[in-house]
Image (cartoon, rainbow, N blue to C red):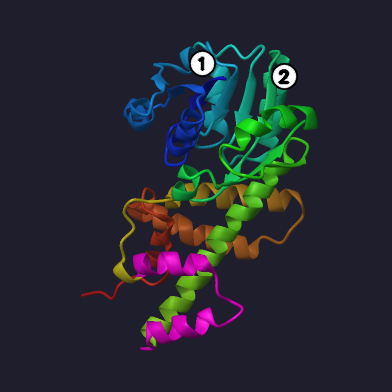
Amino acid sequence: MRTAWLGTGLMGSPMARRLLAAGHEVTVWNRTATRTAEVVAAGARAAATPDAAVASAEVVFTMLRDGPVTRAVLLDGPPAPALAGRTVVQMATIASGESRELAAAVRAQGGEYLEAPVLGSIGVAATGQLLVFAGGEAELFARLRPLLARFGPEPLLVGPTGQAATLKIAFNQLIAGMAASFCHSLGIVRRAGIDVDLFMGLLRRSAFHNPSFEGRLPRYLARDYANPNFPLALLLKDVELARDEAAALGLDNRALEGIRDLIAAGVARGLGAADYGALYEVIDPPAAG
């Protein structure tokens, strides 16, 4: 199948390579052109503009920073990609309302639209073991399921357009909540002079343990947030999406606002491009002197 991939960042690059490995034609575009190098080396063609990438594609995948960027790339141009007769698969974390607006705009041009966000790390993306869940029409999902299965073994249709976007936001705010809680616990333990190995040993035997704590602990202890799997600035974007979605649904957002403020403080300190583990620097900053 002839595909276009718009957005070859941390997750987009390994996912586009999964399509290449399955024998599909892939034309890639990224705002920073140098970030297409790995996918091009694997056999993709590079395009200078989004409309050039889409020109020969049957299916257009987008994995861009947020909803406004996705809309600008897909719809605003100049020149805007021709979407008539093409299927757009939007895979980034965006607001449910943004996804529904994109769907309406794509359909107005004579195209088809499916939202299909994913859960998992860069390493999981490279091995095709992501959790893929879609929102949209059942018939379109059924047609695209073999393609989506290149990213994860059991793609699911969760409901109409917007519901998968909402579900992804609900998951991503958990990332922020669990990270903030663990950073607080670790900070309490370390400042009280309690052995971290003792703390972790007991935590592993408890109902509170989460595997993500193990993976992030070395970063916290070394205060090393290079080579991010998920940058802090993107976590801030997702927490703000969750705050807005929750507010629209009538939830009390005080806990989420507190976590949002902690993350924003880290971004304000210049840690936005660092791994989201840099949240620890805000919660438990190193002692002065």
Q: Residues within 10 Å of mark 2 (few under 14, many from 20)?
A: some
Number of callouts in the render? Answer: 2
What is the magenta range?
193-220
Q: Amino acid at mark 1?
A: Gly
Is residue 112 inside the magenta stretch?
no
**Is 121 positioned to the left or the right of 91 in the image?**
left
Along the polypeptide, which appears first: circle 1 or circle 2? 1
Q: Is residue 243 visible?
A: no
Q: Main secondary structure of the magenta part?
A: helix
Residue situated furthest left in the rendering:
289
Image point (36%, 25%), residue name: 40
Across and down, in percent, residue 41 comes to 33, 27
Q: Residues within 10 Å of mark 1 (few under 14, many from 20)?
A: few
**Is 224 positioned to the left or the right of 216 in the image?**
left
Determine which of the numbered discs, if any, sits on residue 107 in the image.
2
Q: Identify the image quadrant of residue 39.
A: top left
Q: Secondary structure at mark 2?
A: helix
Q: Is residue 67 visible?
A: yes
Q: Secondary structure at mark 1?
A: loop
CA gap between label 1 and label 2 equals 17 Å
In the image, residue 20 sits, relative to residue 266, either above or below, namely above
Image point (59%, 76%), residue name: 208
Determine which of the numbered discs, if any, sits on residue 77 in the image.
1
**On the rendered image, what quadrant is the N terminus found in?**
top right
**On the rendered image, what quadrant is the C terminus found in?**
bottom left
Image point (53%, 50%), residue name: 120
Across and down, in percent, residue 144 comes to 67, 29
Determine which of the numbered discs, if any, sits on residue 109 in the image.
none
Q: Are marks 1 and 2 in contact (CB under 8 Å)?
A: no
Image point (68%, 17%), residue name: 111
Across and down, in percent, residue 236 comes to 50, 51
Q: Identify the image quadrant of residue 254.
A: bottom right
